[in-house]
Amino acid sequence: MAKARFHKFKTISEFHTFRGLPRPEHPLISVINLADVKIIPEGENSILLDFYSIALKRNFGSKVKYGQQEYDFDEGIMFFISPGQIFRIEVKKDTPLNQSGWMLLIHPDFLWNTSLSKTIKKCEFFDYAVHEALFLSEKEESTILAIMQDIQQEYHSNIDRFSQHVILAQLELLLTYSDRFYNRQFLTRRISNHTVLKKLDEILTGYFERDNMIRNGLPTVQYVAETLNMSPNYLTGLLKVLTGQSTQQHIHGKLIEQAKEKLSTTGLSVSEIAYDLGFEHPQSFSKLFKSKTKLSPLEFRESFN
């Protein structure tokens, strides 16, 4: 197999050249029919883009790597890559080029000074890991394809003063549907997702039982997500749909449980409990406790007397 290589693309034109495609018709946006892509360099390629990528793919014929794990994408899936993210593609020798689907590339400059420039940054699925791709039903795939093709049609039309506005409106619709379909994915995978909830509770319980808060501080969202092999944004998105609470709120909930137990069953001072739970400053602990329970730690303790 060919040696692993790193490729950084500052412009969409550079990426077109890399994939053996003609120059884009617009320097800041491109719609690519993946059936037209004839060149996928053999070997393992780490890729970094300075622009957004939204892809709908079938029969990719490659393995996409995230960390040390490999994921096969042979079904209709979407994944979203924001500028500055690194992903790796490994293509095996003699892999047939039978991939299909669409790829939309958008340079941040195309969104400059528009409301979508802020909206797209709030789309958490751009920060999801590769293995947290969006798996589409046939009906959902048809919806996304129709929007992609509308964007392509406008992209190939003569540029006029309406072109950017039309494409931006279609792109915003595409992002809205993607958000809706991710919400559906969180709901329809209830068995596996509720397993995540159980594992999350076990992770937090184990973390607090090991009394390592003094040494390591409070468990972070990043720590919990990495332990579950998820990206922080994907985990929070899943939890919000299932429970209405973010990962941080779940951590705080478990923390308050531990605090209540110590306040009601031990003679430790509020400061000692705060330090035991990983707080550097007792005031921070008291403020969080009151925000969650409407009582100060001392008021809560007195309620048991």
Image: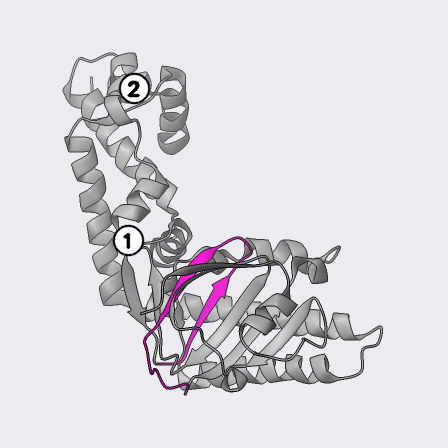
Q: Are circles 2 and 1 on residues that touch, CB within 8 Å?
A: no
Question: For the magenta stretch, what is the residue range?
Answer: 75-97
Q: Give me the residue at 52% from left, 82% from top.
A: 37
Residue 45: percent from the left, percent from the top? 41, 64
Give the spatial CA distance, label 2 vs label 1.
30 Å
- Residue 278 belongs to magenta span: no
Q: Give me the residue at 61% from left, 77% from top.
A: 31
Question: In the displayed structure, would residue 105 be above or below residue 202?
Answer: below
Question: In the displayed structure, would residue 93 be above or below residue 82?
Answer: below
Q: Nearer the viewer, residue 286 or 217?
A: 217
Which label sits on residue 161?
none
Q: Which residue of the protein is positioned furthest toward the right in this rendering?
A: 161
Question: Circle 2 sits in a helix, a strand or a loop, which is it?
Answer: helix
Q: How many marks?
A: 2
Report if residue 174 is visible in the image: no
Residue position for label 2: 274
In this view, the mark in front (2 or 1): 1
Residue position for label 1: 229
- Residue 86 belongs to magenta span: yes
Question: Circle 1 sits in a helix, a strand or a loop, which is it?
Answer: loop
